Amino acid sequence: MRRYDFLIVGAGLFGATFAHLATKKGKSCLVVDKRCHAGGNVYCENIEGINVHKYGAHIFHTSNKAIWDLVNSIVGFNRYTNSPVAISKGQLYNLPFNMNTFYRMWGVTTPEEAEAKLAEQRAEAVEALNGREPQNLEEQALALIGKDIYVKLIKGYTEKQWGRPCTELPAFIIRRLPVRLVFDNNYFNDKYQGIPIGGYNRLIEGLLGGADVRLGCDYFDDRAELDGIAGKVIYTGPIDEFYGYRFGHLQYRTVSFETEVLDTPNFQGNAVVNYTDREVPYTRIIEHKHFEMFGQDVYDVPKTVISKEFSTEWQPGMEPYYPVNDAANNALAGRYRTLAAREANVVFGGRLADYKYYDMAPVMERAISLAEQVL
């Protein structure tokens, strides 16, 4: 059996980036993944000629030119700009909070009017705190943005997303809220953003070029054999699973999807529409074609594909999405990290192994940093 320099457990963005860098250095890599496709959660499934983000919307954005140059050396990126909208009680609002939002909310038309209204609402919240620091997400949000926007655009959505009242969520979740006193609907502040032309599968295939890939292969089913054919293991799976959950399970929030093919070329006119009312069971609807089709291209494809997203509490057997980084889970993760630090031939990295949520560019930065240490 062939021997490899690296066994990479997980063919997601972290594992694929490490494999790309290692093979460029002349190292041999075997990448295994228990799913029957590479790409992890950025994987796209083509339906009716539309690249459907199977595990939820992914928009690549970064201010790191080296990362931007790296991904563009593999596949070109389009001009997609993330400009989500929110629906509350049948009314549309722009996100992030900007002059379009404030005009819809209060009828103000100048930055001075908007700032005055925000200051008035913030003052009410600060007065209610009576000199103490915000103790939960609700108090923090009210102090940052005021009652009107909190009630209409934050409270219901956040409680659906986390499955508990905002008064029971820690304040740190929402320590910063983007507020712009300009008519700019671009959600991100980064210099670069877009979607790979042809979908994320092309990016992953390019990153994995030169590595051997074995799909439908559960590392834990063949652990002894797989460990024996590589000099070092790069592990990107759940850190608690690696240690047989000896201290217990780490907690996550997870997402489920209801995906439909609709006999219309344009369902909602935007890629991302959030539903902020608590009584609406889903958090948002994604219309996938708007990530890659613009103008007449939208109507040249006669059908569209939408996905409704439902946020639920994670249970073993479900896909883990968002780490619950509260004090108890962080302490538990710390115990696992102590074990990981003692491993001689295993290196841990990525969202599940680090028990930390990453956007795509930061997870690539983390993989690059690890590669610089290991290679």
Image (cartoon, rainbow, N blue to C red):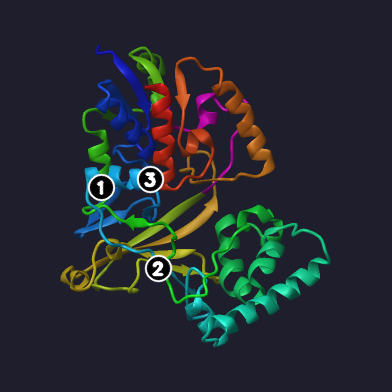
Closer to the camera in the image, 302 or 334: 334
Residues marked 3 and 2 touching at CB (< 8 Å): no
Q: Residue at x 64, y 27 (%)?
A: 335
> In the image, 315: left or right of 171?
left
| Residue topped by disc 2 | 83
**Which label's residue is closer to the chain start, 1 or 2?**
1
Q: Nearer the viewer, mark 1 or mark 2?
A: 1
Q: Is residue 141 in view from this perspective?
A: yes
Residues marked 1 and 2 touching at CB (< 8 Å): no
Could you say which quadrant of the image residue 177 lies in?
Answer: bottom right
Cα–Cα gap, marks 1 and 2: 22 Å
Cα–Cα gap, marks 1 and 3: 20 Å
The answer to whether residue 58 is above or below residue 332 is below
Q: Amino acid at mark 3?
A: Asn
SS at mark 1 in the image: helix
Residues marked 1 and 3 touching at CB (< 8 Å): no
